[in-house]
Image: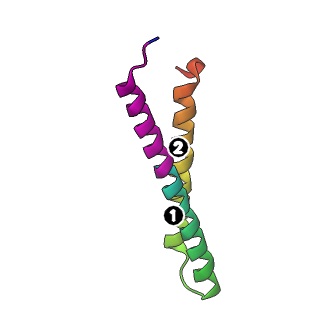
Amino acid sequence: MDIKWGPLGQVFVVALGATVAVVVIFTLGLLAASARQDAGERARSTTIPTATAALCFSACAAIVVYGIYLIVPQFH
């Protein structure tokens, strides 16, 4: 059995990068949702924090759906 370490390393780096990206985007969405709540309590506009939170959560959902598309062969 021969292990090709180069492609294995590439898969590891891409998976790690995608995981970190999803976590960071989700965290930004949570921060924006928190900012929305704070703005609402202080009677300020909640438009920008709401849009930012929606964009971040939509990006996370799109990344997850794309990953499932890549994994499940019936979707190709």
Asked if residue 3 is among those painted magenta in the image, a careful observer would answer yes
Tell me if label 1 and label 2 are in contact, CB under 8 Å.
Answer: no
Mark 2 sits on what residue? 62
How far from the left and from the top, in percent, is residue 15?
A: 47, 39
- Mark 2 residue type: Ala
Nearer to the camera, 66 or 8: 8
Q: Is residue 54 left or right of residue 13?
A: right
**Figure check: 55 above or below 43:** above
- Residue at x 54%, y 69% (from the top left corner): 32
- Residue at x 60%, y 73% (from the top left corner): 34
- Residue at x 56%, y 37% (from the top left corner): 65
How far from the left and from the top, in percent, is residue 50?
A: 55, 68
Task: Please state the extent of the stretch shown in magenta in the rendering.
Answer: 2-20
Q: How many marks?
A: 2
Which of label 1 and label 2 is nearer to you? 1
Q: Earlier in the sequence, mark 1 or mark 2?
A: 1
Q: Secondary structure at mark 1?
A: helix
Q: CA distance from mark 1 to mark 2?
A: 16 Å
**Figure check: 55 above or below 73:** below
How far from the left and from the top, in percent, is residue 14?
A: 42, 38
How far from the left and from the top, in percent, is residue 17?
A: 43, 45
Furthest toward the top, the residue is 1
Mark 1 sits on what residue? 28
Quarter where residue 75 is shown: top right
**Figure check: 23 above or below 73:** below
Label 2: how many residues lie within 10 Å, few (<14), some (14-19) or many (20+)? few
- Mark 1 residue type: Leu
Quarter where residue 43 is shown: bottom right
Furthest toward the front, the residue is 1
Label 1: how many residues lie within 10 Å, few (<14), some (14-19) or many (20+)? some
Q: Secondary structure at mark 2?
A: helix
Quarter where residue 27 is shown: bottom right
